[in-house]
């Protein structure tokens, strides 16, 4: 997600007193293709299950950060869950059951990722500018990182891990429509060093390595664009450019995932859909929730089964928080894991 400036920002604003006082599949059938040139085919996602309802305390629910553990179990976060309600949820997608694995009295968690270094689950707490880690079973919560970086507090949205377990964070910046204050932050795997890799970004939201770990795809929510940061062997940014301009209308660019063929899955905040591009910017497909699914407003993120093509998309709105499924264009890899 999942940035909390307009999207969660609006929710956190309503919600701010709590914190401060994110199975089947039908693919492209004849007649489903968009009439727009270059729009690609339409993929109809199918509802798997409902996970949450709008919370009375916050007036909302917003699912985010789908990620698979080593056993193939899916975990998601609920950005707006109040104290005592499930903030991290474990889902058995085969049995269509779920259970809470973590809650607390303060965090607003916008993403979740497992570290390849220590196997723990890492969460971004947008409200408090912290990175929190849990044991794989949801126990042993620890504050991994907090504090200012180069004189400014983070508003961390999503996480991507490199092969060594260092964290790359999309920092949305202070909520503002007037200035581009977003950054990309690199935190060492032990949490001892933090550095700004890029700044002056327009509400940095999604972040994912490309399939070869040569660069980072990032979405900038308030400009509806995907930028590409090329990295050197030390994880430093050597160049940056706008790669794709997303025609989202009233919807905005949320989280990003990448499949084994290097395709980008760009979630849309403000529309229950995702757009899929290849690495050269060609629009390959649009993943849509059926029109009959009333009360769903945003598709914030997706995780593709490791080594398989079944994709699980987090979709939320006044009707609640849901998982929808569809067949991805290629197999899932670490970069497909809901960062």
Image (tube, grey):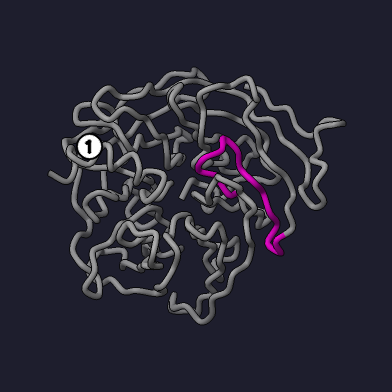
Residue range (magenta): 266-281
Residue farthest along the right direction in this orientation: 30
Residue under the image location 70 percent in, 57 percent down:
278
Answer whether residue 294 is visible to the viewer in this image: yes
Answer whether residue 165 is visible to the viewer in this image: no
Residue under the image location 74 percent in, 37 percent down:
42
Percent across and percent down for residue 29 are 83, 30
Q: Few, some or many C-alpha atoms within 10 Å of disc 1 (few <14, some 14-19, many ≥20)? A: few
**The quadrant where residue 227 appears:** bottom right
Residue toward you, 43 or 297: 297
Q: Is residue 113 left or right of residue 267?
A: left
Q: Is residue 155 left or right of residue 313?
A: left
Percent across and percent down for residue 84 are 20, 27
Q: Is residue 277 magenta?
A: yes
Q: Is residue 287 left or right of residue 88?
A: right
Residue at numbered disc 1:
139
Residue under the image location 24 percent in, 54 percent down:
130
Residue toward you, 332 or 39: 39
Q: How many marks?
A: 1
Residue toward you, 192 or 243: 243
Residue toward you, 111 or 95: 111
């Amino acid at each position: 997600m999942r940035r909390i400036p307009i999207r969660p920002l609006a929710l956190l604003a309503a919600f701010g007193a709590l914190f401060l006082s994110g199975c089947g599949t039908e693919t492209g059938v004849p007649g489903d293709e968009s009439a727009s040139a270059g729009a690609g085919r339409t993929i109809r996602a199918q509802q798997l299950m409902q996970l949450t309802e709008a919370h009375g305390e916050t007036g909302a629910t917003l699912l985010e950060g789908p990620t698979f553990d080593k056993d193939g179990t899916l975990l998601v976060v609920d950005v707006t869950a109040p104290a005592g309600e499930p903030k991290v949820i474990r889902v058995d997608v085969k049995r269509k059951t779920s259970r809470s694995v973590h809650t607390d009295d303060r965090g607003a968690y916008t993403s979740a990722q497992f570290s390849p270094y220590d196997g723990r689950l890492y969460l971004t707490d947008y409200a408090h500018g912290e990175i929190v880690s849990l044991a794989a079973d949801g126990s042993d919560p620890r504050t991994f990182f907090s504090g200012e970086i180069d004189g400014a507090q983070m508003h961390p949205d999503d996480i991507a891990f490199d092969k060594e377990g260092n964290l790359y964070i999309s920092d949305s910046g202070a909520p503002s429509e007037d200035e581009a204050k977003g950054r990309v932050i690199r935190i060492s795997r032990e949490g001892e060093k933090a550095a700004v890799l890029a700044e002056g970004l327009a509400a940095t939201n999604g972040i994912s390595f490309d399939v070869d770990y040569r660069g980072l795809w990032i979405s900038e929510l308030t400009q509806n664009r995907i930028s590409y940061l090329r990295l050197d062997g030390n994880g430093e940014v050597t160049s940056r450019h706008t790669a794709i301009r997303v025609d989202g209308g009233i919807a905005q660019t949320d989280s990003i995932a990448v499949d084994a063929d290097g395709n980008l899955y760009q979630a849309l905040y403000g529309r229950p859909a995702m757009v899929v591009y290849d690495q050269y910017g060609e629009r390959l497909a649009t993943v849509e929730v059926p029109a009959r699914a009333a009360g769903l407003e945003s598709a914030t993120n997706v995780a593709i089964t490791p080594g398989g093509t079944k994709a699980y998309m987090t979709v939320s709105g006044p009707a609640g928080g849901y998982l929808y499924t569809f067949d991805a264009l290629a197999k899932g890899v670490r970069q497909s894991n809901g960062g």
